[in-house]
Image: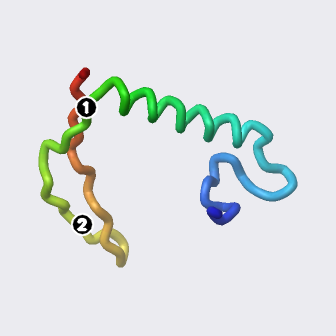
Amino acid sequence: MPKPYTWLTFSAGARSCIGKQLALTEIKIILIQMLRKFKMSMETTDLIMKMNNFSYQPQALKTKFVKK
């Protein structure tokens, strides 16, 4: 179970967003539909780590979507 403050967009506690569950369900449905209709591939497999404010953060991997 994720921690309450994992999704700050929805807030947490007594005044959290009432549409949180609906929004998360919609995200899952859209992601599943995309994965069914498109083939995903990585343009590069090199993971580049960049030092940023005392911690390493991965740089974006280039992803390509091709319609099936």
Q: Quadrant of residue 23?
A: top right
Residue count near mark 2 (Cα–Cα under 10 Å), binned few <14, some 14–19, many ≥20: few
Kind of residue indicated by mark 2: Lys
**Residue toward you, 16 or 67:** 67
User: In the visual, does 42 lie left or right of 19?
Assistant: left
Please determine whether, in this image, residue 48 is positioned above or below residue 51. Answer: above
Badge 1: how crowded within 10 Å, few (<14), some, or many (20+)?
Answer: few
Q: Quadrant of the N terminus?
A: bottom right
Q: Please name the amino acid that badge 1 sits on.
A: Lys
Residue drawn at 69 percent across, 35 percent down: 22
Which residue sits furthest bottom? Answer: 54
Q: Alpha carbon of mark 2 to alpha carbon of mark 1: how far?
A: 29 Å
Disc nearer the start of the sequence (2/1): 1
Q: Position of residue 36 (x, y in %)?
A: 37, 28
Place residue 5 in its image quadrant: bottom right
Helix, strand or loop for disc 2: strand
